[in-house]
Image: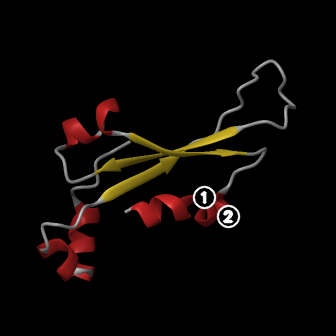
């Protein structure tokens, strides 16, 4: 994982200048990775997809540490949830 404070932020600031100038706006990073809890059963239909959120407004040495990565939700399922991830993220979006 890498802190996107270089080219990505500059591009985002150019595209959305109102967002960049308001100090109340927070930049959040979202990542997810799946794993099978039962390693011995390689054909197991069970898997978990934890979704983590981290605030990118902090310095890189802080936001990439465990204490600033928040487990947002767990998605159960046998496959990658990318096609229907918006259903699972609706609750965290409503909270924000």
| Number of callouts | 2
Looking at the rendered structure, the secondary structure element under dot 2 is helix
Residue drawn at x 59%, y 66% is 86
Q: Is residue 59 left or right of residue 38?
A: left
C-alpha gap between disc 2 and disc 1: 7 Å
Indicate whether 60 appears above or below 56: above
Q: Residues within 10 Å of mark 2 (few under 14, many from 20)?
A: few
Position of residue 92 measured from the top left corner of the image (x, y, whole percent): 47, 58
Q: 32 left or right of 81?
A: left
Residue at 26%, 52% in the rendered image: 56
Q: Is residue 52 above or below residue 28?
A: above
Element assignment for label 1: helix
| Residue at the top extreme, as displayed | 40
Residue 4 image offset from top left, x and y in percent: 28, 54
- Relative to the observer, which residue lies in front, 13 or 69? 69
Query: Which x, y percent locates residue 94?
Result: 45, 66
Q: Nearer the viewer, residue 84 or 9?
A: 84
Q: Which residue is at a point 84% across and 38% down the rendered structure image?
A: 45
For the C terminus, the image quarter is bottom left
Examine the rendered structure and indicate whether residue 95 appears above or below residue 55.
below
Are the residues tagged 2 and 1 within 8 Å (C-beta)?
yes
Label number found at residue 88: 1
The residue that label 2 is drawn on is: 84
Name the foreground residue: 92 vs 40. Answer: 92
Which residue: 37% across, 54% down?
29
Q: Position of residue 19 (x, y in %)?
A: 21, 76
């Amino acid at each position: 994982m890498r802190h996107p404070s270089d080219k990505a932020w500059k591009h985002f600031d150019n595209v959305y200048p109102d967002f960049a100038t308001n100090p109340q706006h927070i930049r959040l990073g979202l990542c997810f990775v799946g794993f099978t809890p039962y390693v011995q059963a390689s054909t197991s239909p069970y898997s978990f997809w934890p979704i983590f959120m981290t605030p990118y407004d902090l310095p890189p040495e802080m936001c990439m540490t465990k204490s600033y990565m928040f487990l947002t939700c767990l998605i159960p399922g046998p496959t990658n949830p990318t096609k229907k991830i918006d259903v699972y993220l609706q609750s965290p979006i409503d909270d924000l």
